[in-house]
Amino acid sequence: MIFLPMLLIKRVIPFCAFLLLLISLKAQEETLSPLTFTPQWLPQAQFAGFYMAQEKGFYRDAGLEVSIVHPSASVMATEQLKRGEADVISLFLVTALSKRSVDFPLVNIAQLSQNSGLLFVAKKSAGIHSLEDFNGRRVGIWKSGFDEIPKSLFRENNYEIQWVPLLSSINMFLAGGIDAMTVMSYNEYDQIINAGINPDALSVFACSDYGYNIPEDGLYCLQSTLQNRQEDLQRFVRATEKGWAYADTHREETLSVVLRIMTDAHVATNYAHQKWMLEKVLELHQPGSKHVSSGELAEPDFYKTLRLLLEGGYISEKISFQEFHRNLMQDQEVK
Amino acid sequence: MSLHPQKSIVARILFYVLPPCVVLFLVSLSIFYVSSKRTIEEMTHRNAELITERTVLRTEQVLKSIEKITENNIWLLENGELDEADIEAFTSRIVRDNLEILGCAVAYAPDSFSDPQKAFTRYSYRHLGRITSRGLDNETYAYSLQDWYQLPATLERACWVEPYFDTGGADALISTYAVPFYRRTNGKKEFAGVFAIDVSLDWLTSIVSSVRILDTGYAALISRNGTFVTHEDKDLIMNQTIFSYAAELESLLLREIGRDMQAGNRGFATIRLQEVDWVIAYMPMPSNNWILAVVFPKAEMYAPLRRITLILVVLLVVGLGLLSFIVIRMVTHQLAPLHGFTETVHKIAGGDFDVPLPDIRTEDEMRDLHDSFARMQCDLKEYISNLQLTTSAKEKIESELRIAREIQMGMIPKIFPPFPNLNELDLFAILEPAKEVGGDLYDFFLLDESHLCVAVGDVSGKGVPASLFMAVTRTLLRSIGPRQSSPAAMVSVLNRSLSQNNESSMFVTFFLAILDLQTGQLKYTNAGHNPPVWLHAGGTPERFDTAKNIPVGLFEEHAYGEHECTLLPGDGLFFYTDGVTEAENAQKELFSDERLMQCLGSSTDPDPRKVIECVRACVDTHVAGNEQSDDLTMLSLIYYGNSHEKHLQN
């Protein structure tokens, strides 16, 4: 009889505790809300914050079971959102505004990037040293989407540009098929450098220096998703913010995760380029001189973008800022 | 065996032989190393260059053959009026006829096909062993924006497009050779489209991958934009450009090398990456301006040299060890008899003259040494035996001389005081011959109860002849004395006796005096002898200033005269031979008459024994241990007169 309490302490109590733990874990798993996020491009350091939020369990901690599904060459992020295959996507502001319509009521739930990484680069050897020198030149521009700002910029200055549509390669520029091209500071610019052209051989013009500091990456969902799953979205947005903060403070770890994800997805890459990209993207996230809280889309930026799209004829209807942007990072907790 | 350089010949030989050998070897090795290093560098560089050239040539052959296919077929596109079926047949035929071709595309520029409403394209490709054809113009594939179309169309020349990894079907690294084609419309050349051929780069990577140089050296292929097309490190392929790799390794030099490659230069570079020095030889491929680089670790280039050097150093150490061993063995062997000789010498020195010499079988210096030793041993034996004979003869003579001396000394009176009953007089004398026997003599005897005869003489020459002459003189004196009453008569008789039959012409200086003990009257004759000293009682000593006369024994008929004086009680006389005044010190200074007079003057005790001891001490002080060269004779007497008896009674 004297052994019974010892037996209880040694065997029965730990076993009960283990059972309780299993039950509670199961319960927690069951409460995780599934959410699919689609970035606007293939895996790269541009999306490091999302990867780290996933990797470090910030989404799970927020009660979300997030799937990060990258778009394929044939199906774009907007298409996946439209089809309901993604709950949240990331998009450039100009893309989102130009794609938004009555049938496709996109809502910006957090603005991540506050600055424009859009640059024009030209070889100095082509004789381009100032913006005026672009007049009459062949300038490469991406076919898929982000041509609104460059075209608007030159239209404003009344320059005649021979626009040469490009997919994503810089080979036309390197081979001399075009005199200049638009690049993202965090991506193609570094690709050009990594193709052997020294920075001092290039003339670089940042759109932000010419009044076009248009914010880029933001998080978008459909109006209906916002109404139905606001709490999940808010948790997602905040966990994402944590992910970006972690990426900022743990860059080497972040890079190794990015490289692993890219390798798994069979996307060609290298350390140096992703490191460059991470640094530049993190710079673009900084508000700089703009007075914005985190996740906020500055109203002037919104109107400037809207105006250039209207003037360029990319869209025909005005959009309400209040309808378009709802900063879930700063919103009150939803009861 | 000691190897101390000061103590051992072997050590000394090693000390002088080994360091020059080491220095010589090290100098030779350094020269060998430096020149070999240069040669190896040149050879390896040349080899790398040759490998690069050969590989480029091999790849060029294939690339050229691809280019040839387009050249041979493009006329059809430029001149023929082709419909859709013709073009599909055309592209299919090219793929079918050329196994190295994966796919072939003809893409007309929009509006330039025979049916201007269509942007016609046709692509034939191998798929699952069959040749399939399809169009390329669809929503997801904008052919006119693809590099293979855009580049030749824009640049208006044939291009090798940057390689890409096809995951669609070929699952291979592919590069496309694309050529623009033109149409003449109204005599005007217009761009009509692009003719492109997809080629798998497997053959190229296998050629490049098969290149080997040294142990781990390899070749890499780099595209126009710097992308690694082939590389030992598979992770680099299609992921990195040489420039991104340079950025990752933070090597500006690598970037510069990449730029030099891109500029179409061929060359060599040495670069340190990840703690390893690499040598890179590179060369562009003429067709597509891709770069072939041969890379190898610099250290491997020198590996054989290091091996040889190591072997040489080991050989040096072994060789020097062997040399030392041989030197030690040879020298020790050659010098081994010396130890025997050393022992022999020790034994000979110990008196064993018959000790056997070491056995020498060679006919060299050691044999000479042996013979010399043998001769020395013989001579030594002979010498020692002679020495023994001589020594025994000498010892015999010495023994005889000793006896002669005893006889001679026995002839002169040596008992002092000589006349214990005579109160008027005291007397003391010494005779110290320079050799065993001498030619000095003194004598004194009473002629009657009141007359004392005293004589001192010095025979010319020394040794045995002088001693014999002295013996004769003394014997004659004793026989003459009692029969003559005056000194002159005694000396004259003595002279006559000695002069007769004196064939050796020896002579003797002689002083003879007769003292009347009652009166103190002294009669004396000096025959060529040192005049005696008159020691006045309480006064200064005075020499007998008399004519010396000629010595006794020279002229038979010479008549000697005599002188006379009277001694006062307390007066003394001091007789001596020239052995006293001519006693020499080491500086050859004579004792001299002056020093004698001084000495006698300083003597305070008139007792004859004390006077002689005093002079003896003066002479000893003067000669200071220098060897006595002449017989030394002194005789001193003191005359007390008749008053002496009263004095004694008192």
Image (cartoon, coloured by chain):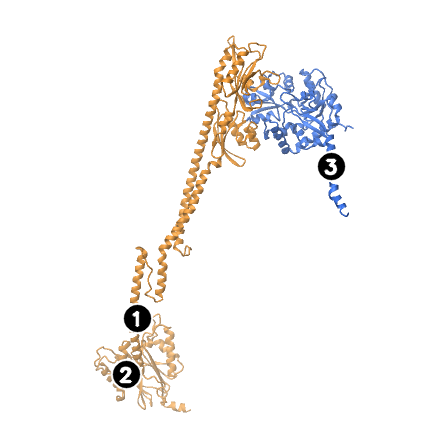
Residue furthest to the top: B186
Q: Is residue A303 above or below residue B185?
A: below
Image depth: mark 2 or mark 1 in front? 1
- Residue at point 75%, 46% (across, down): A6
Q: Amino acid at mark 3?
A: Leu
Give the SS element for disc 1.
helix
Residue that badge 3 annotates: A21
- Tell which of A158 and A55 is nearer to you: A55
Q: Chain letter for mark 3, please.
A: A
Give the SS element for disc 3.
helix
Q: Chain letter for mark 2, please.
A: B
Q: CA distance from mark 2 to mark 1?
A: 39 Å
Question: Neighbour class for label 2 at 10 Å: few (<14), some, many (≥20)?
Answer: many
Res A223 quadrant in image: top right
Res A221 quadrant in image: top right
Give the SS element for disc 2.
helix
Q: Amino acid at mark 1?
A: Gln
Q: Is residue B273 above or below residue A5?
A: above
Viewer can see residue B263: no
Question: Neighbour class for label 3 at 10 Å: few (<14), some, many (≥20)?
Answer: few
Quadrant for the C terminus of chain A in the image: top right
Q: Position of residue A139 (x, y in %)?
A: 59, 19
Image mark for residue B388: 1
Residue furthest to the front: A1
Q: Position of residue B49 (x, y in %)?
A: 45, 30
Q: Is residue B314 above or below residue B624?
A: above
- Residue at point 38%, 81% (across, down): B611
Image depth: mark 3 or mark 1 in front? 3
Q: Which chain is blue?
A: A
Q: CA distance from mark 2 to mark 3?
A: 156 Å
Tell me whether marks 2 and 1 sit on the same chain: yes
Image mark for residue B474: 2
